[in-house]
Amino acid sequence: MSLTLSKKASEVKPSSTLAITAKAKALREQGVDIVGFGAGEPDFNTPDNINQCAVNAIEEGFTKYTPASGIEPLKKAISDKFRKFNHLEYGADQIVISNGGKHSLTNIFTAIINEGDEVVIPAPFWLSYPEIVKLAGGVPVIVTTTKEENFKITPEKLAAACNEKTKAFILNSPNNPTGMIYTKEELEALAKVVVEKDIYVVADEMYEYLIYGEDEHISIGSLGQDIYEHTITCSGLSKSYAMTGWRIGYTGASKEITKLMSSVQSHQTSNPNSIAQKAALEALTGPQDKVKEMIEEFASRRDYIYSRIQALPHVSAPEPKGAFYAFIDMGETLGLTYKGEKVGDISTLADILLEDYQVAVVPCTDFGFPEYIRLSYAISKEQIEKGMNRLEKFLNDLK
């Protein structure tokens, strides 16, 4: 047999968000003043009490293997958080702590998918969803939403996408990249379809604390026993606690699914990082004042960047309700010219912004919307202002 490589792995697309971030970083290292609206990573440091807890764990020798699905005190803290914040009852034996949100999703789809099972993914979507589904042997079924629908899937569209091969539906609220939030009424309508079609809903709630104004986060699994039994809830500490590099995610699910995910994780990674688990325990049970400060700052940045977008020529965007992204329609600009040539496509536009205006943005082709860009406002107000000034100049330079 000739030396061949995995067809499944070769079909996986690299992350465009990490690629644009790496390119921007390389330019910075060359001395170029780049404003990076790229990766979804808070610019805040992890709170001191969490860091100190990790230092204590190292000094106390808490550096050995832990149970595969995580330590019991952290599971209890997550169970308490689920009950108090999400109004969900997941016992410690229904929780798996993983190496970040992506790992949690990988565990989920490995546990529920058989080869050829379909997973409904509303577009725009976080670009990793289809790739994680494909790696698990599943088939992503993309359902495109519209501006008129506020980029949220309707129960009619969900029902129409389901067939005998459908295994699950991914629900991301607050949403990356749009910042949209599903209301209770919208969730109830979707829950009815999920139960009727007898499929799973994978509820990715990573941005659950990052909600602004009068809106509130509602977990779909909290809306009744029937939908609870069809729901797998996924979250983590990366965004809300500025702990992206610590790599702690977690899931709440039925005991049966939890057992499968735990078994899978035991062979793939042994266990989540022991020190990060101690830090996560402090994050969930310690003071929450820094989290509130971060949310208030994100809200201020959201208000500023949205006001700037509204004043720009040629573009439009929905008002972000949560997370920390602005989702901007650049369709009109693609038909305009820059330096005598038509812009043409979103990748070219992103290259122009980076190379000529020193602004790194994420083109949303890999998010299912090839005429849009995503701006992360998880950067300082000063950087946002500088970047928006440059974006405005670019738009005014178009003919």
Image (cartoon, helix red, strand yellow):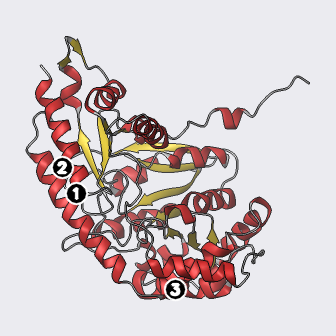
**Residue 70 to residue 381: above or below:** below
**Where residue 123 appears, x then y in whole percent?**
38, 45
Which residue is drawn at the image coordinates 70% and 52% (left, top)? 114
**Where residue 366 appears, x then y in whole percent?**
44, 38
**Residue 342 to residue 25: above or below:** above
Q: CA distance from mark 2 to mark 1?
A: 6 Å
Residue farthest to the top?
A: 340
**Residue 275 to residue 133: above or below:** below
Q: Is residue 318 left or right of residue 156?
A: left
Q: Is residue 316 visible?
A: no
Q: Is residue 56 left or right of residue 161?
A: right
Residue farthest to the front?
A: 31
Q: Do the residues bearing badges 2 and 1 touch, measured as CB atoms within 8 Å?
A: yes
Sequence-earlier tag: 1 or 3: 3
Given the image, on which type of amino acid does mark 1 rest?
Answer: Lys
Q: Secondary structure at mark 2?
A: helix
Binning the other alpha carbons within 10 Å of mark 2 as few (below 14), some (14 to 19) or many (20 upward) gives some
Q: Is residue 145 left or right of residue 61?
A: left
Q: Which residue is mark 2?
A: 385
Given the image, on which type of amino acid does mark 2 rest?
Answer: Glu
Q: CA distance from mark 1 to mark 3?
A: 39 Å
Q: Is residue 337 left or right of residue 117?
A: left
Can you tell which mark lies on residue 288?
Answer: none
Q: Which residue is mark 1?
A: 381
